[in-house]
Every structure is written in C-alpha cells, then in structure tokens.
Amino acid sequence: WTGPEVRKCYQPITDYITDYSQFAADDDANGPLFFADVMKYHSIDDVTAQDMASNLLNVVPYEKGFFWWGGKGISTEHTAWLNLINHVEAPLSGSCKQNSKAVSEQIGGQIFSDSWGYLALDKPEIAKDLAEKMSSVTHDLDGIEGGKFIAVCISLAWNIHDTRELIHTALQYLNQNSNYARLIQEMLDFHLQYPKDPARCLAYIEEKHSYDHYEGLCHILPNTAIMLYGMLYGKNNFDLTMQLIAEAGRDTDCNLGNVGSIIAMMVGLENIDEKWIKPMNDTLLCSSSIGSKNITTISKSAYYFATLACRIHNIPYPTETVSKHSTDFSLPYATNGFQIETTRYHACNIRVQDNKLKICLDDILSNQEFKVYKHSYYRPQDVYDCRYEPEFAAILEPNDIIHCQLDNPEHLPLEIAIYIKGYSGKIYHSNFTQDLNLEYQPTINDIPYLEYGLIIRSQNRIQRNYFAVNQFEIIKHPSYQIDFSTLAIEDWGYDIG
C-alpha cells in the first residue's frame, strides 16, 4: 500500500486494522529468531560471515517459506541463497559485485537485524559488527548500513531515551560516505528545521524518496526515510510512532517491526499499551526448516535471547531456564498460547498473574464443560493466511506424558481432565478428578494431535471466582508409527512470490 492509499482508507490508525486471530509466519520474525542460532556455537570474537551463512542454509528450507523467493536477480535473499548453495561463500554471496547494486541494497539488509541488537546488550560496537557480518551474507552497501543501523539503535536504546539523540548517536557507527548515512543526516536536518510539522516531512519524503527514485523492487532507503520520520516525530511514544509509520505505507511490516523493536527497547514493556500485545496471545509461528521449532511463544523467545546474550557475554544466568516443552507464566502476558472457551453458559477469561495462568470464572452455570487449551499443531484453516508457508511438527506426540499442576485456593466444585484433540477432530481425555496434580499419557495414533489442554466441569454454579494453572509440562516419550497414505497434504494456498 502507498501512504496515500493507507490514509484514504484507514487514517487514523490507532490499533490493528485487521483481526488476524492467529497471525501467520512472517519473514520479519523468522530471520531474527533463527539467524541468532549461530551464536550458540561461536563467540563474538570468532564468528564469521561464512559461519552465519552456514547457519542460514541450516535453517532456511529449500526455496520454500522463511523469506520471499522472488527469483534470482529479483529477490535479494533468493539470489544470495542460490550463491551459497553453489559454493559462493559469504560475504561475496551478498556482494554488489556478485549480484548488482539494485539487488544488494534492498530492504532485507535491515529487517532481520533486531537480534544482534538484543544480543549485544548495551554494547553498540558489538551490535554493529554482528549485524555487518550477517547483512553481508545477503546484502551490500546501503543494505549492510541498514543492518548496522537497526542493531546499533536497539543496543543504544538500553541507555538513550530520546529518539533524536538515539539516531544521531547511531549515525556515528555507520560509513559516513554511504547514502544511508546521508539520508539520516538529511532527515535530522529536516526535523531540526520543522520539528512540529510531521505532515510537511511526510510530503517531503513522498516527493524526494519515493520508490521511483531508486533501483530494485523494494529499496532500503525509501523505507528508512519512513522509519526515521516516525522515530523523529513520534515524540518518544510507542503508539504515536507506530501510527505515523503505519499511515505512511510502503513496506509497513518491515518498518514497523524494526522501529517497534527500537522504541520498545527504549520505553520498556510498561509503556506499551496492551492493545498491541494481547491479540498476539504470546504465540509465534515460524517457517524454518525445523518443524519442531516453528511453533513457539514470544515469552520463550525472550528467554532465548536473554540466555543467549548472557552466555556470549559470560554473564551468570539461572541454569534452570524454561524447557522447550514446559510452560512458564512468570513474564507479563506469558499465556504460552493458551486459550479458553467462553459462552453465555460459561463466561470466563484467562490472565497471567503471580506466575500462574489465572482462570477467571465470571459466571459458570451448573454442569457446564469448557476447555482451556493450546494448539499442538496448526492447519491452514487455523491461521489468517499462508504467508511464508510454515511447516510444523506437532508439539505433543503419542506416548508423551502431559503433567499439569493446578491451584484451587477457593476449593471450587470442579472436576478436571487433561484432553487431546486428534487429527480426526475426536477428543480423548483422562479421567475427571478433583486432584490438583494431573497426568495423562495419550497413546492413540490419531496424529498429528491438533490441541491439548484441560476440560473443566462445574458441579455447581460458580460466579466471580477463579482457579489457576501453575504448570503445564510435556515430558517427551514419543513412540508411534506414521502411515503417510492416511495424512492429508496441507494446502497453504498461494505463497509469497
């Protein structure tokens, strides 16, 4: 969408304009989460661009999902990937010499760089170096400068709490002779001259820095101009910054994602409105080549970046970190993707409080059943669209043991069972009980299991009360046979590219 098209239809944008329900996999999330894996095997000092390239080949499927496969000489990432599998090593794989200036300066150079800012902590020089190496795998010139800028801004945002100062400081880490650095200075100068006139700035960008001034399909600089506009005129406010960038159009998910990371690091979670967080329900779907890692949560990703940063900086951290197959409700909004069935016969809700998943029972009629559940596997009809063609392995498999620990401080008249939903849609469950420690080991071969959770049965009417889930854990003991002739081919529809 162009800026005028967005504003014509949707201005003002103060919230999500589409109810995505479950948001699909997206390249802007895939890259930061999976490219960081390389640091599990290398130190800051010894990691090379080719190490990062090898990791990219490990986590990116063969011309499917993850990012845009638009063809050689068109899609930057596709072009660089073809170079790598044909033994052209990084950084030559992403170089202007190998791929052309137009291809090497498209927006992908910066959209995956958030993770290097997270992992660098408050050390912008490290953020710059890591981002430069990773961006060089696929990009060159201003494509690399963009990667450096995003990572450095996130790192600086640990200690700098004004966007103009942040941008000015980050500029010092870039190649001052690059067009990227010149654009930053141009936008700083414009803001200095017209500090209270965002409309004038946007009009200037739409005239001077539209796509038709640049080569390629999605050049980095027209989008960087929009990002700088939002940061400079957003008054250090997350909501206003998001609104300005969304209403400016162009590559909105990339621009909002990068700037969202920067501003969020600067202002902290406590200064981000719940309206941006709760619809995500702490769920993150990905489309790497590793199906078992493609269904995760935002809270687990936060733990992942935090523990990985501690490890590479030699900072002590708790050794008992969150297991891949257990829940942890200690972080704000960390629902771990759990949902709840609610109707006029059983009105209820969930929230995270006191390190528990609190099940708030507004009004539950007698002898009603409802479910608290999460997805073990996603089918195409479960997500908003097919973008980046995710491939999933089910979280729960036959013979795994499900363990759940509950808290019922009000001694509510409830009977509870652990259940699973098979691929056929049939429900299987343990015996109903009032015990607070539940365990269930499903063996049925109705695979893949689509969801798992709790069935709650009220013995009497319950109003204005609650119980809680302390822990939900899967102990992995998978043992089963797969007859592929009985499995449907999941149709994810049209792909990107």
Image (tube, grey):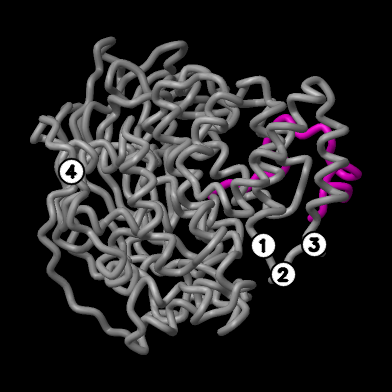
Depicted 436 relative to depicted 46: above or below: above
Which residue lies under the disc numbered 2?
215
Q: Secondary structure under badge 1? A: loop
Q: Tag 1: residue type?
A: His
Residue sitting nearer the eye, 51 or 184: 184
Which numbered circle lies on residue 213? 3
Q: Are marks 1 and 2 in contact (CB under 8 Å)?
A: yes
Question: Does 142 appear above or below 490?
Answer: above
Give the Cα separation between the discs numbered 1 and 4: 33 Å
For numbered disc 3, what is the local secondary structure? Answer: helix
Residue extending furthest front?
A: 177
- Can residue 9 be found in the magenta stretch? yes
Name the residue that disc number 4 marks.
312
Disc 4 residue type (three-letter): Ile
The residue wearing badge 1 is 219
Look at the image and give the residue range highlighted in magenta. 1-22
Image quarter where the N terminus lies is bottom right
Residue 427 visible in the current orientation: no
Snapshot quadrant of residue 403: top left
Q: Camera-side residue: 127 or 492?
A: 127
Where residue 204 is drawn, which disc sits there?
Answer: none
Q: Earlier in the sequence, mark 2 or mark 4?
A: 2
N-terminal of the two: label 1 or label 3?
Answer: 3
Q: Is label 1 or label 3 in front? A: 3
**Left or right: 235 as drawn, with respect to 272:** right
Residue type at numbered disc 2:
Glu
Picture coordinates of residue 292, whole percent (x, y) = 28, 62
Q: Earlier in the sequence, mark 1 or mark 4?
A: 1
Q: Position of residue 332 (x, y in %)?
A: 38, 24
**Quick check: 177 above or below 259?**
below
Q: Main secondary structure of the magenta part?
A: loop
Q: CA distance from mark 4 to mark 3?
A: 42 Å
